[in-house]
Each structure stands twice: as structure tokens, then as C-alpha cells.
Image: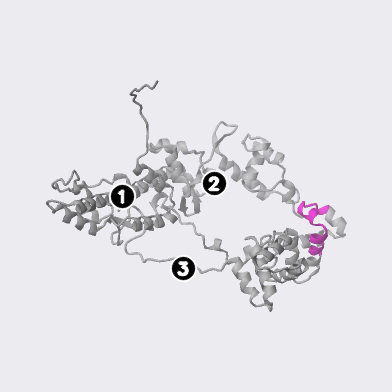
Amino acid sequence: MLHQRLSQKQTQKLSPQQIQLMKMLQIPAANLEQRVKEELEANPALEQVDNSLDNDTNEEAWENKEENPEEKEENEKRDEIDMSEYYSEDDDVADYKFNANNYSKDDESRVIPVKVNHTFHENLIKQLGLRRLDDRKRKIAEQLIGSIGDDGYLRRDLLAIEDDLAFSDNLICEQEELEEVLEIIQSLDPPGVGGRNLQECLQLQLERKRQTEAVRNALRIIENQFDAFAKKHYDRLARSLKLSDEALRLAIDEILKLNPKPSGSAGDSEKANQYIIPDFIITNEEGELHLTLNARNAPDLRISGTFKEMIDTYTKTKKPDKEAKQAILFIKQKIDSAKWFIEAIKQRQNTLYKTMSTLMKYQYEFFLTGDETTIKPMILKDIADKIGMDISTVSRVANSKYVQTEFGTYSLKFFFSESLSTESGDEVSTREVKKILSNMIAEEDKKKPLSDQKLMEKLRQKGYNIARRTVAKYREQLNIPVARLRKEL
């Protein structure tokens, strides 16, 4: 038997505006311009304003900014739609015009020239055109080049490439023919390209160097004692190859000059075009820090003047017909969307500035000196509590954002770290411990590198009471190998 009953419950749901703001907070400065362009294309009620006003502001402008109330005209209601709320005389200036971009209106607009690059594989194909090859060998060579990875290695089995040629080009070939064409590819630049493993890659590079005694000894090491070299068993190498300590050192030096990733020496990789655009700029003016937002790539937006004229036209219509009503609803939807987007941009800039300003004050000493050991322990909750926002909001601000300082450009995530108690009871950042650990390893005797146990003892002597496994964890996070692999002659 069915029973019907009424019940009340409270639920929390995010509004479309809140969802839009959260997405906007996650976008770094490098991608904000593209996001604005997409909105301009999707919404005809939104248009871009020429940058004719001075955008320079300081911290007081952000902290003391008060918006002027919009002057609204009361019009007669048309089908319960009040059109006056969708436009005002102030719409000619973007609502978030007070954002900071550290540029003056008199500054010359400069565009960074971007080099047109060829990919690593395109360079190989281009070099292949200079070799005298028949159509058959050229098809094989192109298939082999297409199988080379971005790091320059050919890790695909030649038997699999045979099958590819048979299915795609109806070309039947033997493995000996593939080996012959592969040798041609391995003679291309950069040296080492087409190697099937690290050993072959290094061997190819050594064979193309001027054959001095050191290079010949290096070839012997790679060809006959590669495993001992990889594990840095130098005593075994000297005994097996009957080399003196000096001859072994010179041979090892030749190997260390080689490139383990040959594609990196091509110079025309697409990755070379990647730039970091800082979202914040911190400047030091006579010992006082100033923060500005790098918002030059965020164009100023306003409601389209065409839509305002359409509103005026339909507002003056005494008895709108069905098509006029539909037009009014369309205009209402687009103007709402445009206003929401402009407001999201404004809130984004406010939230970014508020969060970074608090972070700057928290890590003030670091931004003054650039000394990593002065970084205080700080987690997302510390900043969230100070600005009165949720931890997730701070997390979105910190994600993929960068700050430019006189000491370099840093990711915001760099400044967040856990705390560690010293013997004196003070709390220090794990970032400080990692910096001291890194300095210890950099200054160690490379002939007798410090083990994790020795590093732990030295840190404890400095007052940092941590376990050996914690030292190992920090060392791995710093991408520093174990003591055996740090050993040098």
C-alpha cells in the first residue's frame, strides 16, 4: 500500500554564478585570455573595450575601493520583465577596471616574438631528404622515424615495425634491411638518435667524436662494462680494463658529457615554446614590498552597445508581439550571462589579490631576502583562516599560479609546507630542512658521499631531530640519488 507524506529538508547547492567563479579561480593568467575570447565568441551581449584608461593601482586602491551605485531608470514592466536592470550608463567602463597590471597607459605595448619551430621528427624527415634513398628505403626510413619516441629512442621492436610496413604500405622487408636503414637514421643529427637503449645511444655518440685515448676507453667501458659503470663500481672498471685512476677519470668525463636524451639537443622541440606567465608581481621598494596583479592579458569587458539599443527599441514598444517577447527573453538571457561573467572576473581578481597579499605578509621575510631557510611552515588552512574563505578556494588560487619576485618566479605551491619541531621547541618549515639537506649534499666530498645515516646525524647536530627514513624521503623529493650513485672519481 502506498503512503503519501510531506517532508522538509535543507540542502546546499551551488548557484551557476558560484560554479563559474570557482572555474575562473582555477585559470592561470596564461589561459585567462583564451577563456575571455571563448566567452566573447559565445555571447554577443559581451564586448571588449579598448585599453584607454590607466590601470595602475596600488594596495590602497584594492583595500579601500568602493563601487559607485548604478543609476537605474524605472521603465514600465513588459510581461513581468524589468529591462532597466540590464543596462546603465556605467557599463561603458568594465566593473573590474580597478585591477592592477603594473603597466602605465603610456607604456609601449610589446609583444614577445615567438620562434616558429620544427618538431624533432620534422627535423629528422628534413635531414632524410638530403640522403639518396629509393622510394622503398624512404618509406622504411619514415616508418622508423615515426616509431622514434620524443626522447630520441627507438624502443619499438623491429619485428613489429616489419608488420606495420606490411599492413600499412604492403611492403615486405627483412630485418636486415631494417637494420641497414636504421643505421642511416642513426647517422642523422642529433648524435645518438635512434638508439634502442641508453647503452646504444651513448655508444653512437662516442663513435662520432674525435677518437682520442679517453674516447676509446669510454667506448670500451660502454661496450664491455656498462653495468659496472651504471652502478659506479669504479674499482671493478679499473681492474677489468687495466686503467689507471687518471685514465679512468678522463674516460668517465667523456661519458658524462654525452646526452642521455638526444632529442633534447635538437633545440626545436615544441616544449621550447612554453613560457611561465606570472599571475602576481612582488617588488621591493626601499625595503617595503608591493604586490600587483599581472592582469594585462585580461581585456576590459562591457555590455554591448547594440544590445542596449535593442533594449531601448523593445522598451518603447507599447504592445510587443510574440516575436518581440521572444527577443526580449533572448536579450535578458545574454545580458544576464554577460553580467555574471564580468562579475566573475571582478571577484576572481579580488580573491586572487586578497589571497596573495595574505601569503606575502605571511612569508614577508622570504620575499625581502630570497633566503629559502626563512620560509615559515604554512598550510592552506593558515591562509584560509586569515582571509575568511574556504580551504578549497585557497587551493584553487594556489593551483597553477606563479609569483614573480626579484629572486625568480615561484609557484604558489612552493610556499606551502608542513612544520617540523626542533630541539629548542621552535617550529620550522620542512622547506628549510630540505634546503639545508641540499646544501650538505652539494658540499660533501664526492669521493666519499654522505649516507642517509650520516646526513641524519649532521642534521641532528644542527637541532633538526628527524629520522633516517625522513632524510631518505626528503632526498628523494629533491631528486637526489643515494650516496653510492653520487660517488665521483
Rendered location of residue 255, percent (x, y): 74, 61
Please tell me whether mark 2 or mark 3 is closer to you in this view. Answer: 3
Going by the image, does 467 lie left or right of 243? left
Q: Is residue 248 visible?
A: yes
Please tell me which residue lies in front, 191 or 13: 13
Residue 112 painted magenta: no
Going by the image, does 408 lie left or right of 307? right
Where residue 470 sits, quadrant-wise, is top right
Residue 219 painted magenta: yes
Chief secondary structure of the magenta span?
A: helix
Where residue 473 sits, quadrant-wise, is top right
Rendered location of residue 162, percent (x, y): 71, 64
Location of mark 2 (residue): 372
Q: Is residue 296 above or below residue 427?
A: below
* Residue found 46% across the figure and 50% down from its top: 401
Q: Amino acid at mark 1?
A: Ser
Q: Amino acid at mark 2?
A: Glu
How many circles with numbers are drawn on the protein?
A: 3
Give whichever of discs 1 and 3 has the lower sequence position: 3
Location of mark 3 (residue): 113
Going by the image, does 320 lie left or right of 463? left
* Residue found 67% across the figure and 37% down from its top: 469
Give whichever of discs 2 and 1 has the lower sequence position: 1
Please tell me whether mark 2 or mark 1 is closer to you in this view. Answer: 1
Going by the image, does 163 lie left or right of 22? right
Residue 337 is marked as: 1
Q: Secondary structure at mark 1?
A: helix
Q: Is residue 141 above or below residue 423?
A: below
The Cα atoms of the two marked residues, 2 and 1, are separated by 45 Å
The boundaries of the magenta stretch are 217-235
